[in-house]
Image (tube, grey):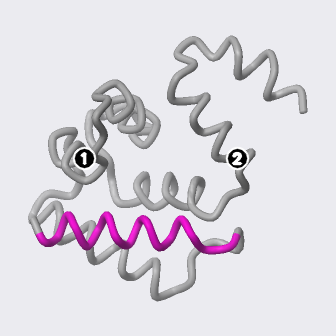
Amino acid sequence: MMILKQLAQCLANVGRRPRTGFDKSSLERLEQLFIKTVGNEKEIRREEFKKIVTSKNPFFTERVFQIFDKDNSGSISLQEFIDAIHQFAGQSPEDKIKFLFKVYDLDARFYDKFLKRR
C-alpha cells in the first residue's frame, strides 16, 4: 500500500511541473515506483491501475486505463505509463481539458468537431 501512495504522490508532483517535461530524477522515480508496483510483472494490470488511479467514478478510471493502454493489451507497460504521464503532466489547462474530452467523449465526435479545429 505504501508503494501506491508513493506513486500517487509522484504523479501529483509531476503534474505540478512546468511544461518542460520530466527531469532525470522524476523519470527515475516514476520508473522505480512502477517496478515496485508491478513486482516481477512487466506491466500494470487493470486491477493494480485502479488502486493507483482512484476515483469515485469507475468509468473515469476505466477510460484512463484504456487511454494509457495504447496497444490494447489489457495492461500498461512502463513505456506506455511514462508516455501517458508525460503527455498529461505539466500541460496547459487547455491540454488537460482535451485529455478529459478523450476520457468522456467515447466516440470522439465532440473532440474531433470542436477541439481539433483549433
Look at the image and give the residue range highlighted in magenta. Answer: 2-18
Task: Report the disc number at residue 49.
Answer: 1
Which quadrant is home to the C terminus?
top right
Residue 56's x, y, as percent?
28, 35
Reading the image, the residue beneath label 2 is 95
In-image side of 57 versus 38 (left or right): right
26, above or below 41, in the image: below
Q: Residue furthest front?
A: 56
Q: Is residue 16 magenta?
A: yes
Mark sitting on residue 108 = none
Counting residues from the start of the chain, the first of labels 2 and 1 encountered is: 1
* Residue drawn where x is 27% and y is 66% of the image: 34
Query: Secondary structure under badge 2?
Result: helix
**For mark 2, does the 10 Å Cα neighbourhood hold few (<14), some (14 to 19), or many (20 or more) residues?**
some
Which residue is depicted at the point 34% across and 70% down?
Answer: 9
Does 76 appear above or below 57?
Answer: below
Question: Counting other residues with Cα less than 10 Å from the Cα at mark 1, is it few (<14), some (14-19), or many (20 or more)?
Answer: some
